[in-house]
Structures are given as structure tokens and as C-alpha cells.
Amino acid sequence: MTFSKITENRANRFRRALYSWTGEHPREMPWKGERDPYKVWLSEIMLQQTRVEQGMPYFNRFIRRFPDVQALAKASIKQVLKQWEGLGYYSRARNLHETARWIVRSQAGRFPEEYSSILRMKGVGPYTAAAIASFAFGLPHAVLDGNVHRVLSRYFGIDQTMDHRAGKKLFEDLADRLLDKEQPARFNQAIMDFGALCCTPKNPDCTSCYLRNQCFAFKLDRIGQLPPAKKSKPRRIRHFHYFIVADPGGQVVLSRRPAGDVWPGLYEFPKVETDGPQAPKVRPAGVDLPPRAKIGKAVLTDKQVLSHQVVHGYFYLVRMPETPKNQLTQPVDKLNRFPMPGILARSRKFWKELLS
């Protein structure tokens, strides 16, 4: 399938319809219209695997804490992860921090300005590079995210996913063909907003759609079939049993998660993983608990759903007669200083109240 025969007149009609629709349906976002490459970069990294509504408060807090690339480069990874806490996909925060340091140290603080250079930044793929290039520098590169894919699939009747190289190349070529070379930022923002607000995955607002008269899916009643659904793998189910080891003064034991698993670099309580919800028969490694330390039933349970995993958490309170030796301990009311996975961060108030 090729779209080389799409005339400039048809492409112009497509653009004008998009511009008209978005002009009448504005979408407010704190980074919209931003030309500062640091803020554009941050917003695009945050929006990877994150909904706009969820990402906006994080973006605002992050910018207040790290207003420019120099401030981000000076920060510790612990401080960066703390600001990212609860947003998930923490490798994005680590890539941001590492890249900020590279920009300051190796690029004299100057952000890369060419698409090929932006693409070499850690954690930046073709979509993110195109977004930064067009929004920050006005370069003619078309974005291709899930919203854009859905709009093009329905409008042109393309029954393909982007899971394989041929399908992705087809949509890349089509997006490039339609791109407004004179106003790439305007076009990219318009088609993404249109996909997010009008041509939604479920229950799209076809009645207000300015493209429906030429839309293949609308005319043939195939809205629910395009784009075709991806085959998803079942999520891995995991069971984490956390031990809140506390001394009489309210000091609790913390450990830092290693690389090679979920939440690397974040802090947690000592833990044992089991194949099911049953209480573990072993004690957490690295914590010298007295043989007679009483461990009762879980006093709290929670669950966190990740993209490929579901983590069930079970929390046990273990009171110690004295502060454990050779362990990282912190007062329970100071736990908010440490970046933690969401399943733990949500329970900080509970532990403070229980141990106070």
C-alpha cells in the first residue's frame, strides 16, 4: 500500500479540517506552545506511557523543582526519583537525569537541535525526537504516536498495526506526506489533540468530527474495528510480603531495590516474594530478626498494576526491642524523604499513625 498519490490539495483539506476542529476544541496543557527544548523534552518523556491528566501535576512540580537542565543535572538521582514518585516507568527519570548531566558536561549546556542528534539522547525514540524537533525547533518531522496511528488508520482504512516494521513504515510515510511543512508544530499538536479528544479509542465523537465525510471507518461503519487490536500478553502475577521492622522509637528498616527488576533504585521495606498469597515461611534476607520475633497476620494489603505485572503487597509489622544493627533505619515520619514504589508510598500515613 502506498500513499504517494495523495495530492497536496487532499492533504491541505485534511490539515484545514484538523485546524478548524482544534481551533474550536482547545486543549489546555502547561507545555502547549512551549519552545524551550528542556520543557518540551521533559513533557514528552513524561507522556511516554502516561496520560496527560496524570502527567500535568508532575510536570508542574518537576519544573518548579528543576526549572532548567542545569538544575536537573546538579540534582542527585534520589532527588529526581522522589519527584517522579508514583508516575511509574522510573527508567524515564534516570534517563532524564543522565542525559541532563551529559548536556551540561559534554554539550556546554546546549540542547541538541537536529533530529539525528536528538534521537541519540538516552530514552528518546523516533516519536519523541520528532516531537522535540518540531515543537522546540520548528523542524519538519511528523509525530507518530497511538493517537496519530488511530486517526490515520480510521480515516484511510488501514487495517494494520505498528507492531512490525512494514506497518510502522507505512504509517510513517503517510504521516510525513500529510505533515504541514510550514507549520509542523501546529500540525503535530492538532492531530494528537484530535486523536485524544475526538477520535478516541472508544466512543469517538463522530458527530463533531470535521473529517467524517471522507473517513473510511465512518462511512463503512468500521470505527470499532480500526485500528486492529494488538495482541496483549497476560500480566505476570507477583506476591511481595513486606516486613515493617520497627524499634521502640519508631525507626524502621529500609533497603534499596537493585537493578534488574521493577522499581530499581527505589526504597522499600525488607521483603520476601512468594508464588502465592500465602505467608512466607522464611524471614527477609539481610535483616537480623530475633528467632522469637512474632510475625502475625498481614496488617495491610494493597495491589499495584503495572504494564506487564500485577504486584500484590502484604505488610507485616515486626516490633524489635532495639534498633537493628548494620541496617538503614529511618524515623517513620521521615519516610517521605525516600522515593518509593506507589504500593509503599500510599501506606506512609498508615505506618506513621500505627507506630506513633
Image (cartoon, rainbow, N blue to C red):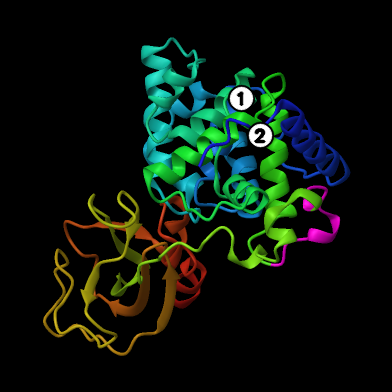
Instruction: Give how far across and how far down residue 107 sits, in percent.
Output: 41, 12
Quadrant position of residue 235: bottom left
Disc 1 marks a residue whose amino acid type is Ser
Callouts 1 and 2 close, C-beta under 8 Å: yes
- Say if 136 sits above or below 214 in the image: above
Quadrant position of residue 5: top right
The CA distance from mark 1 to mark 2 is 8 Å
Which residue is nearer to you in this view: 137 or 302?
A: 137
Residue at 49 percent of width and 53 percent of height: 160
Whether residue 33 can be seen here: no
Element assignment for label 2: helix
Q: Residues within 10 Å of mark 1 (few under 14, many from 20)?
A: many
Element assignment for label 1: helix
Give the magenta part as a residue range: 203-212
- Say if 173 sits above or below 314 in the image: above
- Say if 255 sits above or below 190 in the image: below
Residue at 23 percent of width and 49 percent of height: 259
Whether residue 318 can be seen here: yes
Judge from the rendering whether residue 289 lies leftward or rightward of residue 209; answer left or right.
left
Residue at 61 percent of width and 54 percent of height: 54
Which residue is nearer to you in this view: 68 or 234?
A: 234
Q: What mark, if any, has residue 188 been given in the picture?
A: 2
User: Which tag, 1 or 2, sits closer to the chain's start?
Assistant: 1
Count the marks. 2
Outermost residue, right side: 24
Which residue is nearer to you in this view: 138 or 323?
A: 138
Judge from the rendering whether residue 96 lies leftward or rightward of residue 246; answer left or right.
right
Instruction: Give how far across and how far down residue 289 sits, in percent.
Output: 16, 74
Instruction: Give how far across and how far down residue 110 sits, in percent.
Output: 49, 13
Query: Magenta span has 204?
Result: yes
Q: What mark, if any, has residue 134 been given in the picture?
A: 1
Judge from the rendering whether residue 182 lies leftward or rightward of residue 160; answer left or right.
right
